[in-house]
Amino acid sequence: MKGHPMSEKIVVALGGNALQSKESDGTAESQLAVVKETCSILADLSAEGYEMAIVHGNGPQVGRILLSSETAKDVVPPMPLEVCGAMSEGYIGYHVQQALKHELAKRGLDYPVCTIVTQTIVDDKDPSFSNPTKPIGPFYDEAEAKELEETRGYEMREDKARGGWRRVVASPKPTKIVEIEAVKLLWDKVVVVCAGGGGIPVIERPDGTLEGAAAVIDKDFGAELLAENVDADVLLILTEVEKVAINFGTPEQKDLDHLSLEEAAKYCEEGQFGSGSMLPKVEACMKFVRAYPSKRAIITSLSKAKEALAGKTGTVFTYHC
Ligand SMILES: Nc1ncnc2c1ncn2[C@@H]1O[C@H](COP(=O)(O)OP(=O)(O)O)[C@@H](O)[C@H]1O
Ligand SMILES: NC(=O)OP(=O)(O)O
């Protein structure tokens, strides 16, 4: 229960499948339908007694907002990428607030749900600014991708696993959550949705002012930083797969129940985890258990969240074996 001294504190990172289906047409209505199902699962966790903050991805959403802004540039002034990120936090947060409040009420839980439009400080010298890797927006075929590169100057990258091309942008590592004190103040009484899309990337100038950066932070790293900052017991990363695997997608695939820091580092070195997909999740879990050797991080599917928290499934990361 919120504010109960025995409650486990969890930071939940929601992957793309928690916000939209594979066949999504990108409409607000289709997103809300999926978010309602997601919030039913999250409300069950609350009813089990877990205290949570929710971090969500925003790759498809921020990319679509940017695309529509650029497409309409002759009619309305285009919005910078970080403003598109702020917009995505707003509308995804709105959907979660509406759906989660309803699902909590159905379970007799009367917690407020509130989104904090969150800024996250990044280093302007982060190497990702000269090496964009974060896929955003819709998928294209190769011919469309080449045309977008030529006509709009987009940087496009192929995602072989998912059979398509996507625009990529810089994705610097988050170093500080600007609104963290607000999150902490609300924690005991409110289910907070924050650091959506990893937070809006901002650079801190020497005089203390903040300036938006043209980038999209990885939400798994944003969630990890939040989990460290609020002293969470568990970092719970929810995605499509129930467990992290080695030899993923091959006949030798082996799903893993547990990873120590040492084993995870070894598999990272072997290139076992998809660089734009599973690798950031694994790295975020490793960072959390390195910072908190007595705690755990879990990667599992949205539908298995409750079982995984109970230790029955998922891939659990701990400092030692
Ligand atoms: N070693 C691996 N083990 C499990 N899944 C992997 C692995 N490597 C890549 N993947 C893929 O990564 C996906 C999760 O990444 P992604 O879809 O980008 O995350 P998100 O849920 O945050 O949107 C999985 O659904 C799976 O298809
Ligand atoms: N910002 C972010 O990590 O979004 P996705 O999870 O949608 O890639």
Image (cartoon, rainbow, N blue to C red):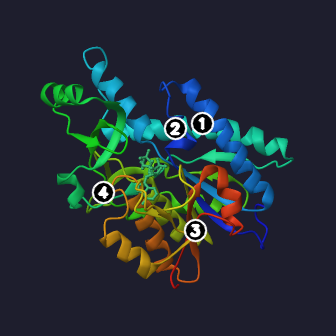
Q: Outermost residue, bottom direction?
A: 320
> How many numbered callouts?
4
Work out whether 204 lies above or below 102: below
Q: CA distance from mark 1 to mark 2?
A: 6 Å
Q: Which dot marks residue 230?
A: 3
| Residue at disc 2, CB closer than 8 Å to ligand 2 | no
Q: Which residue is mark 1?
A: 94
Label 1 SS: helix
Going by the numbered disc 3, the residue's amino acid type is Val
Q: Which residue is mark 2?
A: 90
Q: Which residue is mark 4?
A: 172
Work out whether 103 lies above or below 127: above
Q: What residue lies at 68% left-to-right and 65% top-to-bottom?
A: 309
Q: CA distance from mark 4 to mark 3?
A: 22 Å
| Residue at disc 4, CB closer than 8 Å to ligand 2 | no
Label 3 SS: loop
Label 2 SS: helix
Q: Residue 76 location in percent, x, y?
A: 31, 18
Q: CA distance from mark 3 to mark 2?
A: 22 Å
Mark 4 or mark 2, earlier in chain: 2
Tell me if label 1 and label 2 are in contact, CB under 8 Å: yes
Which quadrant holds residue 154? top left
Q: Which-is-in-front pick, marks 4 and 3?
A: 4
Which quadrant holds residue 36? top right
Assign the N terminus to one quadrant of the image.
bottom right
Going by the numbered disc 2, the residue's amino acid type is Gly
